[in-house]
Image (tube, rainbow, N blue to C red):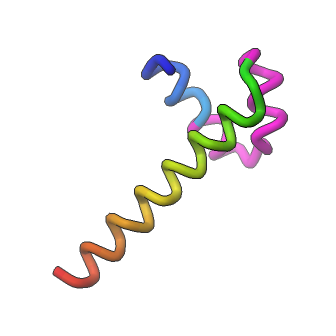
Amino acid sequence: MPLTQRQEILNLRALNLMPKQIARKLGLKTADVANFLRQQAEQATGERQQARWA
C-alpha cells in the first residue's frame, strides 16, 4: 500500500469514518483498510507500553 494511501486512510479515520466508508471512498477492500488500522492501533499500543516501562 503506497504511503499516500496509508496517510489518506489515517486522515479519513481521524474524521471518524468507518473502515467500510474509507474503503469505498478509496476503492479498496474493507478488510485491507481494517487490517491496516488494526496494525496502526497495535503499533501505537506497543509504543505506549514501551514508553511506560522505560
- Percent x, y for residue 22? 75, 31
Relative to 22, does residue 5 appear above or below in the rendering? above
- Percent x, y for residue 37? 59, 46
Q: How many marks?
A: 0
Q: Residue at x 55, y 21 (%)?
A: 5
Q: Residue at x 23, y 84 (%)?
A: 53
Q: Is residue 21 magenta?
A: yes
Q: Quadrant of residue 9?
A: top right
Relative to 31, does residue 16 appear above or below in the rendering? below
What segment is highlighted magenta in the picture? 10-27
Foreground residue, 7 or 27? Answer: 27
Relative to 1, does residue 36 appear above or below in the rendering? below
Q: Is residue 17 magenta?
A: yes
Quarter of the image for the C terminus: give it. Answer: bottom left
Main SS of the magenta part reads: helix
Foreground residue, 1 or 7? Answer: 1
Left or right, residue 36 beside residue 30: left
Q: Residue at x 66, y 32 (%)?
A: 32
Left or right, residue 1 beside residue 11: left
Q: Residue at x 52, y 57 (%)?
A: 41
Relative to 50, does residue 13 appear above or below in the rendering? above
Q: Quadrant of residue 13?
A: top right
